[in-house]
Image: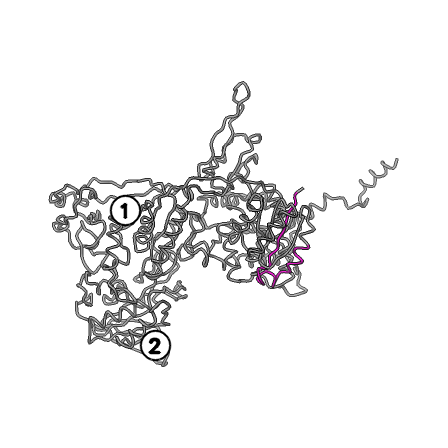
Amino acid sequence: MSRIGVFVCHCGENISRTVDVERVAAEVGKLPGVALATDYKYMCSDPGQGLLKKAIAEQRLSHVVVAACSPRMHERTFRKAVESAGINPFLCEMANIREHCSWVHDNREEATEKAIEIVGMMVERVKRNRALPAITVPVTKRSLIIGGGIAGIQAALDIADAGHEVVLVEREPSIGGHMAQLSETFPTLDCSQCIMTPRMVDVANHPRITLHSYSEVEHVEGYIGNFQVTIRKKARSVDEKKCTGCGVCIEKCPIRKIPNKFDCNLGMRPAIYIPFPQAVPNTPVIDRESCAMFKSGKCGLCKKVCGPGAVDYEQEDRLIVEPVGAIVVATGFDLYDITEKPKGSQIKGYGEFGHGRIPDVIDGMTFERLASASGPTGGRILRPSDGREPKQIVFIQCVGSRAREKGISYCSKVCCMYTAKQTMLYHHKVHDGQAYVFFMDARTPGKSYDEFWRRSIEEEEAVYIRGMVSRLYQKGDKIVVMGSDIAVGVQVEIEADMVVLATAVQPRSGADILAQKLGISYDKYHFYSEAHAKLRPVECATAGIYLAGACQGPKDIPDTVSQASAAAAKVMTLFAREKLEREPIVARVREAGCVGCFYCRKVCAYGAIEEKEIRDRQGNLIKVVAYVNPGVCGGCGTCQATCPSKSVELDGYTDEQIVAMIEAL
Amino acid sequence: MSTPGTKHDFEPKIIAFVCTWCTYAGADLAGTSRMQYPANVRLLKFPCTGRIDPIFILKAFQQGADGVLVSGCHPGDCHYIAGNFHARRRFAAFRKLLEFVGVDLNRLQFSWVSAAEGGKWVEVVTELTERVRCMGPMLEFKELALEEQWSGKLDSLELQEAYNQIQV
């Protein structure tokens, strides 16, 4: 007979406010098999855990149920506690009476009834739990970082400096990400390139960092400590090892009028190019869609002029498999493109702002390229339409952000600050110009942020108008901006030379596809979800995968760098161990019942089902049964639900347990 | 709560089978966000919807559930790669079977609720509870179970005859 101990937690007042914990303990105490049922104010606290351990020793408890918060919160805490008191950790279960009961119901009677049933159900379950031995696996002390922006670079350098190998994968031909595109950064106005490019070079020169640029993650399998990642190295058409980066091919290329994506299509680049002069690696790539050699087979100039013979038109995509123990996802963001309604999206476009139709309506990133000393205008603010200096410029904030009617309800966090910065840059470059900003609220939380914003108004003479813009239209060579000033209560019309839209920060396109490859979760906008909003902000719910930067939510550079270093610290914590204990919840086959139909193999996504021969003493084959390789099994239990003879069982979720739980209700 | 005196003034019992990675976490989020929903639902946690055997749904109805909810990760987002696809296919077939047997499919709901969708969890649970409340108690299984149980009275001719024979 089992001697189950039930511990009902008050969680301060969080549970006891709506659930009568004493009654829960009293009712559950009557269940068969329960030797002790008690309640305590804070079970997770040190005295609470002490109480648990003492009760195990004094009452000779065999199983434990802690009725408290979600197991996602404290299962680990209590399993550790019972283990130290000499009980197998898998003989301890949590009944969730906080998140699933006291916090979501306000009727005390109903909530108490429900709590009693929840705890009763877990008592039936834990009674049938089996003591599970820990499965230990080795840790591969290499990490994969997806994305080579500032987040990925910071995480890569931190981990590599700690002495571990890093594989950095970047989709574009060069690392650097969005930060390499920026002109100057708030709140100090230091030049983005000056602080970014040395770090990019550090990555390229680091002995422990392997950089795969122009590459994408194709496939991920395995689990924490033991991932196998397949990386697609896209054909660059230039041999990275042979190329010296002399740039002669780029000079000679006859196809020169291709809009440069890095410069927000303001400048032109040839068909063989490096995205920007400080690119890392400094190896050109051939844009096969534009190159004459690929389109018509006539040209081949770059190959002729290449001294080291690095140009290779026959190069194909290569697949590389890298074994790693941890993965940091740092895929960053895209800016909301308001030229048209984004395809397949619930988000509505902004036709009324004329972006894409009126040439002098640009987005914030395009303004950065105009203001950048290495940009297409050499740092001069000029209108894309006629190259004149704009004397009246209008900035519109919250374009796409905080716009529930357009489909995005979150705040993009960086736009208030970068718009303030851009008004300053504008004022520094066009002394007689006037900047206007239409804004809803100015959000400036951050060290020295509000002071910076005030400076843009008080010293740099930007005029802030609280209100939104309803419409923009071209009138001659001016753009008429119609908006409202809700502070004064009047309609405003400004004839501007240029309009800059602070468009929303969105996750990278394809973020959902990558999430599916990695098996991590994401929200409705496709930002990746952290394991806990407050206490585990850089970990994914999937063990061994960590998040850094704007892929998890809009972030500025200081926050991104902090999160990247935090993710790196988590990876180093993992790598500090030689062996890792993995969750031993795996499927087992009852060989007596197995008929060898192997339906389980068909549904197993991990390829964990193997064949095992059963022979008699003479060595004659009796039958072939399924065998689950515990090292490979993911523990989903799909095989168990599929098995026609009910011969596979997932520990902790056996049919007997589930039925007992249903019967307890 | 429904107004007193209406025809279906009863508290339905709803059993929810959910996967641990998406819907359980989504329900946690609803809790953390202090959203409110009817207290009729009881959650059973599974690693994956792929683990949920249709027999459990029958078992739940047999044990007096008036409504059953099965919920997991959105298609393509399964933590175990493809478990929810197997579940989806299994339940598509199972629904047909239930329909054939005569169980009102409005009592059984499948949904996808991700870990970030606390609000959706509340919507799904509230909607199902209200729908089942309007439908009234699920009596079919209970009547069957009652029929197989002897009431203790000799209330049929066969029973009376059999009793008389024993008397002799």
Label placed on residue A211: 1
Q: Which quarter of the image is occupied by the N terminus of chain A?
A: top right
Tag 1 secondary structure: strand
Disc 2: CA contacts within 10 A as few (<14), some (14-19) or many (>=20) = some
Name the chain under label 2: A
Across and down, in percent, residue A239 comes to 20, 42
Across and down, in percent, residue A442 comes to 36, 71
Disc 1: CA contacts within 10 A as few (<14), some (14-19) or many (>=20) = many
Tag 2 secondary structure: strand
Residue A4 belongs to magenta span: yes
Distance from the alpha carbon under mark 2 to that under mark 1? 50 Å
Across and down, in percent, residue A609 comes to 47, 34
Name the foreground residue: A42 vs A630: A42
Q: Which residue type carries mark 1?
A: Leu
Quick one: label 2 or label 1, which is nearer the N terminus? Answer: 1
Name the foreground residue: A556 vs A305: A556
Name the foreground residue: A245 vs A575: A575
For the record, the magenta segment spans A2-26
Across and down, in percent, residue A148 comes to 30, 52
Q: Mark 2 points at which residue?
A: A484
Q: In this view, does A355 lie above or below A640?
A: below
Residue B130 visible in this rendered orientation of the protein: no
- A571 lies left or right of A62: left
Name the chain under label 1: A
Label placed on residue A399: none
* Residue A295, quarter of the rendered image: top left
Q: Which residue type carries mark 2?
A: Ser
Say how many tags the image has: 2
- A528 lies left or right of A313: right
Q: Answer yes or no: are tags 2 and 1 on the same subunit.
A: yes
